[in-house]
């Protein structure tokens, strides 16, 4: 089942969710590591190029994921969820998408501040559409840093909420994002 149903996420949503989560946490770790590299370190030039390439692929994945939400809407909220839980989930998901979008755009603005295109692993170049603004790299860098930490913190809360649903509420919130094949077994989970 590729598409989402009213009860489960489909394989496209599940793959995009977990691949993007892995990329985001990997990029965060890479970003923290590479800012400590010295100029003569062998990774000084390579690590940022990897970071930029993955960042642009992540941007494409984000656009695909947003488009997929319109083509294949997510499952209905669980009936056991209160109105406040449903609203909090909607706000949190919106913030996750928004933070990631601003994070990726700020990374692009850092990388193109001097007017040079970004090479994505030598496969293609993404042109610098906006460059040369006063202190562009510095301002975008500050935004990038704050968005990265905010996204990591909010995504950690998102994961904790999913674990709370699974272990305390004992509902299928987490199961729906793990596999489209897991049956809904109890009345509370339907």
Image (tube, rainbow, N blue to C red):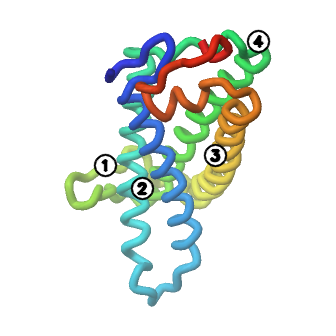
Compare marks 2 and 4 and give the one earlier in the sequence. 4
The answer to whether the residue labelled 3 contacts the one labelled 2, judged by CB atoms less than 8 Å apart, is no
What is the C-alpha distance between the residues marked 1 and 2? 8 Å
The answer to whether the residue labelled 1 contacts the one labelled 2, judged by CB atoms less than 8 Å apart, is yes
**Mark 2: secondary structure:** loop
Q: Nearer the viewer, mark 4 or mark 3?
A: 4
Please give the name of the residue rendered at 67% of the width and 53% of the height, measured from the top-left corner: 149
**Residue assigned mark 1:** 127
Q: Nearer the viewer, mark 3 or mark 2?
A: 3
Nearer-the-camera pick, 7 or 95? 7
Q: Which mark is residue 83?
A: 4
Please give the name of the residue rendered at 48% of the width and 51% of the height, measured from the top-left corner: 22
Q: Residues within 10 Å of mark 2 (few under 14, many from 20)?
A: many
**Residue assigned mark 2:** 112
**Mark 4: secondary structure:** helix
What is the C-alpha distance between the residues marked 3 and 1? 26 Å
Compare marks 3 and 1 and give the one earlier in the sequence. 1
Compare marks 3 and 2 and give the one earlier in the sequence. 2
Nearer-the-camera pick, 169 or 43? 169
Q: In the rendered view, tell whether residue 80 sits above or below residue 88.
A: above
What is the C-alpha distance between the residues marked 4 and 3? 24 Å
Quadrant for residue 135, please give it: bottom right
Q: Nearer the viewer, mark 3 or mark 1?
A: 3
Q: Residues within 10 Å of mark 1 (few under 14, many from 20)?
A: few
What is the C-alpha distance between the residues marked 3 and 2? 22 Å
Q: Nearer the viewer, mark 1 or mark 4?
A: 4
**Mark 3: secondary structure:** helix
**Residue assigned mark 3:** 151
Compare marks 1 and 4 and give the one earlier in the sequence. 4
Residue 55 rendering spot, x and y as whole percentages: 42, 51
């Amino acid at each position: 089942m590729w598409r989402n149903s009213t009860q489960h996420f489909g394989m496209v949503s599940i793959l995009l969710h977990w691949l993007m989560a892995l990329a985001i946490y990997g990029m965060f770790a890479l970003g923290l590591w590479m800012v400590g590299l010295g100029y003569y370190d062998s990774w000084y030039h390579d690590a940022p190029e990897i970071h930029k390439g993955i960042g642009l692929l992540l941007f494409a994945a984000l656009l695909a994921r947003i488009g997929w939400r319109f083509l294949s809407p997510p499952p209905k909220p669980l009936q056991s969820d209160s109105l406040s839980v449903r609203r909090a989930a909607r706000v949190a998901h919106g913030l996750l998408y928004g933070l990631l979008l601003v994070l990726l755009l700020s990374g692009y603005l850092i990388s193109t501040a001097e007017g040079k295109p970004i090479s994505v692993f030598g496969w293609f170049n993404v042109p610098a559409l906006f460059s040369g603004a006063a202190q562009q790299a510095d301002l975008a860098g500050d935004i990038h840093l704050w968005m990265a930490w905010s996204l990591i913190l909010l995504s950690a809360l998102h994961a904790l909420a999913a674990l709370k649903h699974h272990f305390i509420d004992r509902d299928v919130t987490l199961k729906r994002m793990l596999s489209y094949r897991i049956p809904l077994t109890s009345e509370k989970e339907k």
